[in-house]
Image (cartoon, helix red, strand yellow):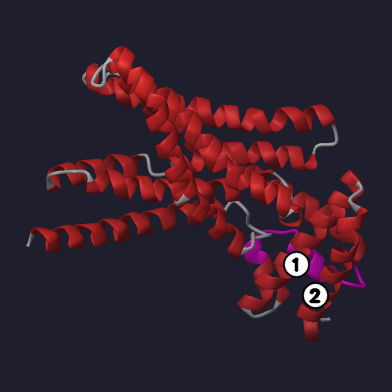
């Protein structure tokens, strides 16, 4: 009976954590309104965060904890702080960020800037959070403890791992479009450093909360609040940025590739674009995606001189837009 109960609890935990993880990632992915990243790369980033990053992080944290436990004592506050506030943030953020680095280095055509960095980073972070949350919840001993932990880790702080790795992704995204070599060198470690610092603040506050009767919990909440505010600001900035890129780099596609009214529809609000393009939803999404990609590739060609990579893709995107327009042209 106990075995059956454990299996039921495991399946219930996986299902509930999975649903919440999916919802959180949908919100984060919504920042990239026009040019959605390929699903296969997002799945790959998620799986990297869920499997290799978790396993390797656990191994490194175990190795690092051994000498500290011998010196400070296994049950000491110092050991707990080292594990939570040093070993975990450093190993986890580096390993989750590796997913962003791999896509950045091997799939540069699909990595256009800091918005893409946020999305890929969030995918890796939520993959890590999914497995970590399931492991923590399955370690509880009572229903009350499970509910309390679920509320704290999955509901209250559910975005954290996605936020942290998104900061690393922003660093890669800034480096992607930087003209200055110095900016390229600084941006990536700066993004990773911001992720580690935020992770350290969060873990330290929660670790000390037990020793201070919750006195340090507000630190974790304030840290979380700043990240939530950052998400809102990033979403608004991304919308403005994408519209400006499309406005600037699609104007010379009129009238050969886009009709004047289609161009106007693409650079206005998304809902208005849908009504004015006069296409079926799936076709409209594909047209907006192709137009956004075309604008991004032309921008990269102008700013970074990526002629070898961008030119063939630019012509392919033009032909795709013409095909998608169909009778509307």
Q: What residue is shown with label 1? A: 290
- Looking at the rendering, in which quadrant would you find the N terminus? bottom left
Mark 1: which secondary structure? helix
Q: Residue furthest bottom?
A: 327
Q: Residues within 10 Å of mark 2 (few under 14, many from 20)?
A: some
Total marks in image: 2
User: Is 66 on the left-hand or right-hand side of 194?
Assistant: left
- Report the front residue among 277 and 130: 130
Instruction: State the mark number for residue 320.
Output: 2
Q: Is residue 15 visible?
A: yes
Q: CA distance from mark 2 to mark 1?
A: 7 Å
Instruction: Based on the picture, tell me whether residue 267 belongs to the magenta stretch.
Output: yes
Vertically, is 193 above or below 268? above
Vertically, is 153 above or below 306? above
The percent coordinates of residue 281 (x first, y second) are 61, 76
Vertically, is 155 above or below 71? below
Residue at the spot 85% in from the left edge and 36% down from the top edge: 179
User: Is 244 on the left-hand or right-hand side of 189?
Assistant: right
Mark 2: which secondary structure? helix
State which quadrant residue 254 falls in. bottom right
The percent coordinates of residue 233 (x first, y second) are 59, 39
Magenta segment: 254-272
The percent coordinates of residue 151 (x first, y second) are 26, 43
Residue at the spot 48% in from the left edge and 38% down from the top edge: 228
- Report the front residue among 128 and 264: 128
């Amino acid at each position: 009976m106990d075995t059956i109960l454990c299996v039921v609890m495991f399946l219930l935990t996986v299902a509930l954590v999975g649903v919440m993880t999916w919802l959180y990632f949908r919100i984060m992915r919504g920042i990239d309104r026009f040019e959605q990243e390929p699903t296969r790369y997002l799945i790959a980033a998620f799986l990297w965060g869920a499997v290799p990053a978790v396993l390797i992080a656990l191994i490194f944290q175990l190795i690092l904890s051994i000498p500290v436990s011998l010196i400070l004592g296994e049950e000491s506050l110092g050991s707990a702080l080292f594990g939570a506030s040093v070993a975990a943030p450093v190993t986890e953020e580096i390993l989750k960020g590796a997913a962003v680095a791999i896509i950045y280095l091997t799939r540069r055509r699909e990595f256009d800037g800091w918005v893409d960095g946020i999305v890929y980073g969030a995918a890796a972070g939520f993959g890590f959070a999914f497995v970590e949350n399931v492991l923590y919840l399955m370690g509880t001993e009572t229903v009350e403890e499970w509910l309390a932990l679920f509320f704290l880790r999955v509901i209250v702080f559910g975005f954290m791992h996605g936020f942290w790795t998104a900061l690393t992704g922003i660093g890669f995204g800034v480096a992607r479009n930087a003209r200055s070599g110095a900016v390229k060198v600084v941006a990536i470690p700066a993004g990773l450093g911001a992720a580690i610092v935020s992770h350290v603040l969060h873990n330290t506050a929660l670790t000390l909360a037990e020793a201070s009767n919750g006195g340090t919990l507000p630190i974790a909440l304030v840290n979380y609040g700043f990240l939530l505010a950052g998400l809102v600001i990033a979403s608004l900035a991304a919308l403005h940025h994408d519209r400006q890129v499309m406005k600037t780099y699609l104007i010379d596609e009129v009238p050969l590739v886009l009709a004047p009214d289609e161009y106007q529809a693409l650079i206005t609000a998304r809902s208005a674009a849908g009504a004015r393009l006069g296409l079926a939803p799936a076709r409209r999404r594909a047209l907006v995606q192709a137009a956004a990609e075309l604008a991004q590739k032309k921008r990269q060609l102008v700013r970074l001189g990526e002629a070898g990579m961008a030119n063939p893709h630019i012509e392919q995107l033009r032909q795709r837009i013409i095909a998608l327009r169909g009778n509307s042209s």
